[in-house]
Amino acid sequence: MKVRSSIADKILQILCIVLLAGTTFYLLAGWGTFPDKLPMHFGASGQIDKWGGKGILIFMLVMQWGLYLLCTGVEQIPQIWNTGVKVTAENRERVYRILKYMLETLKLAIEMIFTFLFVCITLARPLPGWSMPVMLALVFGDIAFWMILLWRCR
């Protein structure tokens, strides 16, 4: 079954592309101005605990694009999705629609997190104390929200 894209899907896709293109442009335009020594790892409190070179930015951008493309590819093949509920003729469309929204919003959350981390790294500053709880809430809250809706489809 092919899940058709709604207007909400298209808006979420556009937001993801804007974040990816913006991050890519930020890297290309700012490469010469970024410090040679950048944070490579942050502790749970947001403090920098490992430093490295600018190569981390290229690695992060490749990871960001790779995760986007992987999630987009998975979206195209609903047959492989582990729905967590029994899919019947009556609930199939609703189950796949909920899962597509979950993938789209999760993809946007990942892109927002990567873009935020990218900027923090290029500024060579610790992460704000609120960042870890917010990032975890974005990802796991999103998954929990859609899973609750999905379980109601049974």
Image (cartoon, helix red, strand yellow):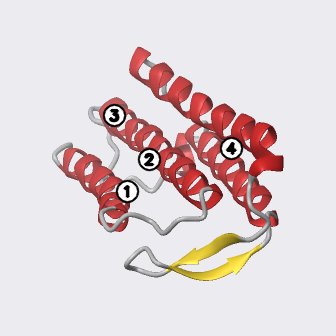
Label whose residue precedes the other's in the sequence (4 or 3) = 4
Q: Secondary structure at mark 2?
A: helix
Residue 15: x, y in percent? 51, 28
Q: Is 113 above or below relative to 76? A: below
Q: Are marks 2 and 1 in contact (CB under 8 Å)?
A: yes
Dot 3 corresponds to which residue? 89
Three-letter code, disc 4: Leu
Q: Does residue 22 appear to the left or right of 112 in the view shown?
A: right
The residues tagged by marks 2 and 3 sit, at their Cα atoms, a distance apart of 31 Å
Instruction: Tell how many labels.
Output: 4
Select label 4 or label 3 by which is in front.
4
Dot 1 corresponds to which residue? 139
Query: Mark 4: few, some, or many residues within 10 Å (few <14, many ≥20)?
Result: few
Label whose residue precedes the other's in the sequence (2 or 4) = 4
Three-letter code, disc 3: Ala
Which residue appears at 21% of the width and 44% of the height?
Answer: 149
The residues tagged by marks 2 and 4 sit, at their Cα atoms, a distance apart of 14 Å
Label whose residue precedes the other's in the sequence (2 or 3) = 3
Considering every residue shown, the one lying at the far left of the view is 152
